[in-house]
Amino acid sequence: MRRVACVWLPTWPTDRWRRQLGSDAPDRSVPLITRMHDGRRMVIASADAAAQAMGLRAGMPLAQAQAMRPGLTVIDADTAADAAALRDLAIWCQRYAPLTAADPPDGIRIDSTGADHLHGGEAAMLADLLQRLARNGLAARAALADTPAASWAMARHGPTPATIVPPGGTVPALAPLPVTALRLTTDVSAALDRVGLETIGQLAATPRGPLVRRFGEGLMRRLDHALGHSFEPLEPVPPTSLIRQRLTFAEPLLTGEAFPNIIARLTRAVAAGLERRGEGARRLDLVFERVDGRMQLITIGTARPVRDPPYLAKLLCEWLETVDPGLGVEAMTLWVPLAEPLAGEQLRVLPSETQATDLGPLVDRLSNRFGAARVYRMAPVESDVPERSAERRAPLDPAPGLAWPSTLPRPVRLISPPQRVEALAILPDQAPAFFVWRRHRHRIHRADGPERIFGEWWRRDAEMRAVRDYWAVEDLDGRRFWLYRRGDGIERITGDLSWFLHGLF
């Protein structure tokens, strides 16, 4: 189901002017307005929160406003700059979803279908969006619903600054809102009010025929957009800094057989753009635009910068089975949201020279198939505590320059957390004669140790006197284990002398 978020900036663009003026901007308690000429007279173009609290609003004659509130701070409006700044803000919102659109004069729309889970859910996404805008001095309200018109209405008339309409709940959510929430003209809203239609619920319950004859088809079109009875498209803003290629089709593609050829053309086009910049793609987003207005997304990542068209096309084609053409795909757009520098590489041409094996293709296929979090390598960390001496890194990240000491072998597998066992040692500084793990008794045949490891006192106070004595032991069946005893056997504060199994060789 389609999900669209709408961000409303009620004091835009006065907030932008305050940011631009910096330290020269008046205090927020001092009302600030911008002015423009509407063809007949000077009027208020926008008003900040302080001015709106005094009853000033956009469209009011400037002379009337100055008569009501002497001492206003007035700035000439720059509509072109305001529109460009709103577009830039819409591009900034692409951190939440790839399809965003500016909604002049004071709104932004985000098609977040299938993207909210990347930010912890819809509520977390809206909360993060509003927090980021607030930190940058921009007052905002936001809403998320099934249609752009519904989210527009809830952002401006919703009960909270961040309103989420559950999927399928558009009709009851919009019913109590005033008809002005349908983005109607002042004349139409006033006419509806005169006939007693004050809310969207009342309007939706009224027969359509008389309404169309009296108010025209535009009213019903607005209502259908809000309730989801007709599709309202968005015109996404393409970021100027990102490489993208879009192909539209004279006839919708009804089956997936033609997709590989289209993908090959798209990857060749974006690869040419990457080559001109001296970059390689680290992530690609392929958007399928269906005739019913729904969009589907394929996202792939690479372990290192790549701009080889056949290779990129192959990675994308592996996910075509997840695409449902529906009634047909009318356009496809390939984005490169993440790219990194990619310089030329000298190939070895002499027979005596061996070409290094490139693990990038293998890592890319595994990562895109199973998820990037499941493909990694372990790298050593400068720590004596075993559970802290290794960390996960990207498969092709450069080595950190550290290595585990060869004189102190470590088990292949560490048990997290260490499991408590019953063990018996003749003396505190000797290896255990046996231990019991998971109700199975293991008699020790050989042992190597102890290796004493102290806690890292600079991390937390509980490790100030922590001591572990590790033993590498082998039982009668030839299985090898890594055991440690907690405490030094002298001071009770160092540990209670209990035994733990921490690893398997």
Image (cartoon, rainbow, N blue to C red):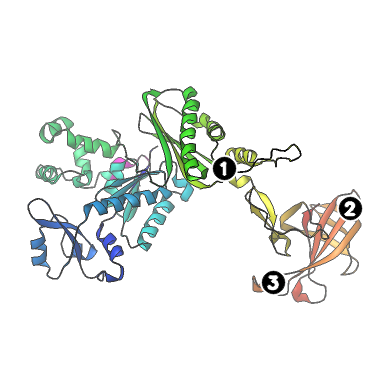
Q: Residue at x 88, y 54 (%)?
A: 474
Q: Quadrant of residue 251?
A: top left
Q: Tell me the kind of residue under disc 1.
A: Thr
**How far across and down, in percent of the image, does residue 203 sit?**
19, 39
- Pointer 1 residue: 302
- Pointer 3 residue: 463
Q: Say above or below: 242 vs 255.
A: below
Q: Which mark is residue 368?
A: none
- Pointer 2 residue: 475
Q: Nearer the viewer, mark 1 or mark 3?
A: 1
Q: What element does badge 2 sit on? A: strand
Q: Tell me the kind of residue under disc 2.
A: Asp
**Residue span colored magenta:** 167-173
C-alpha distance separating marks 1 and 3: 41 Å
Crowdedness near tag 3: few (<14), some (14–19) or many (≥20) residues, C-alpha within 10 Å: some
Q: Tell me the kind of residue under disc 3.
A: Glu
Q: Nearer the viewer, mark 3 or mark 2?
A: 3
Q: Quadrant of residue 170?
A: top left
Crowdedness near tag 2: few (<14), some (14–19) or many (≥20) residues, C-alpha within 10 Å: some
